[in-house]
Image (spheres, helix red, strand yellow):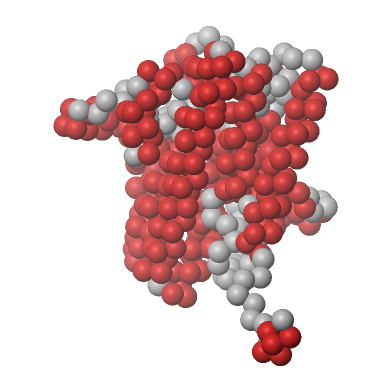
Amino acid sequence: MAENHSPTRRRWEIDALRGLMLLLMTLTHLPTRLTDPLGQPFGYVSAAEGFVLLSGYMAGLVYGRLAVIQGIPATRRAFWRRALLVYACHAATLLFLFTVIAVIGIKVDEPAVKNLMSYYLQHPVQALAGGLLLIYQPPLLDILPMYVLFMLASPWAFVLGMRYGWFWVLAGSVTLWVLAQFGLAERLYHAAALVTKLPVPYAETGAFNGFAWQLPWVLGLWLGASRHQDDPPSLRFPPAVVVVAVLVGLIGFVWRHVEGQAPFGADERMNLLFDKWQLGPLRLLNLAALLVLTLRFGPALARALPRLRPLEMMGSASLAVFCAHLVIVLLVLSLFGGVTTRPWHIDLPLLAVALTALWGAGRLTLWWEQRPVGVSVPAGRRQAR
């Protein structure tokens, strides 16, 4: 979730794409009639994959320039500052869940909220401590902790990439992804629990497998770090690669909208190939195809299409907008429940209020960041006052 904190000029098209991912995430997480049709709209790839990859790209772009100009120590400090900010946002949303949402959910007796925070309701002290330590991660609040860890690990990726080449960083990232498919995260958890007597069950440590999801982050980091020059070389793919990407992307798109969000129906074993939380192999293939198509045809589309300023604004203030989306979704779940079959005369105003709130959060954040600070007042004017 790197934002406008660098001399590197912003890429408006990347901000627009991140804004689109945030919009899709909100429409997917809000329980309305749009939840299912807009979930994974481009194939068996969700907005989360695109957002992580794009955020890694922006981090590579921003901090790659910083590494070249000021060196790795300055880059490390910048990553740590950003990680601290993301952690503060996570802690704030966690406390919001444990206080405001808990009170509303219990008073209204809403099962959707009680299920979401069941471990906290049973073990409040352990849940609070575990949440602040990034161990306990309730649903919806499990992506910011992953970002904190990615930010803390990214300076090491820069060191290795600049000294030995990004090939070894990418090779290590792919190796971690492969190990994640064979239960690396669960094995490490049980080993740690054996030593530390962790009270938080593995099922409560978050849905995202960070060892798998680091791959799109590192891929984005590498792409961004290679593009921070003022006039970087264009990325080109052999025609055969583009043709294969078109076929894979088309198959994924049609399959998703014909079969629904479970590609193999009730066959859980086969569905693991497309599993979101583990970033299964066929899901990764679908993501790679969409990435190739975006890199190949995206620049021409960006030149042809009008600029979508609201999406750009939300993308450039992505951290604030993401947190606002969490607050909105949690409030809706606590007040309206998880039902997605309400009448349109309820859903449409609900969506309008939610999207307006996202826009407002983005505008307020950019206004705050761009406000003049420390403007000196001429002596004559000071005396006149």
Please state, as top left, top right, bottom left or bottom right, where the C terminus lies in the image: bottom right
Question: Which residue lies most toward the top here?
Answer: 266
Q: Is residue 247 left or right of residue 77?
A: right
Q: Residue at x 36, y 28 (%)?
A: 127
Instruction: List x then y, in percent, for residue 24.
Output: 67, 35
Q: Residue at x 71, y 21 (%)?
A: 32
Task: Count how many numbered circles sit on residues in the image.
Answer: 0
Q: Nearer the viewer, residue 57 or 292?
A: 57
Instruction: List x then y, in percent, for residue 194.
Output: 18, 27
Question: Which residue lies most toward the left here?
Answer: 195
Q: Is residue 305 above or below residue 174?
A: below
**Picture quadrant of residue 2:** bottom right
Q: Is residue 79 above or below residue 184?
A: below
Q: Nearer the viewer, residue 110 or 79?
A: 110
Instruction: List x then y, in percent, for residue 179.
Output: 33, 34
Q: Is residue 377 left or right of residue 351?
A: left
Q: Nearer the viewer, residue 80 or 221?
A: 80
**Picture quadrant of residue 122:** top left
Q: Residue at x 40, y 58 (%)?
A: 80
Q: Nearer the viewer, residue 58 or 340?
A: 340
* Residue 196 visible at all: yes
* Residue 298 visible at all: no
Q: Residue at x 67, y 47 (%)?
A: 361
Instruction: List x then y, in percent, for residue 119.
Output: 39, 21
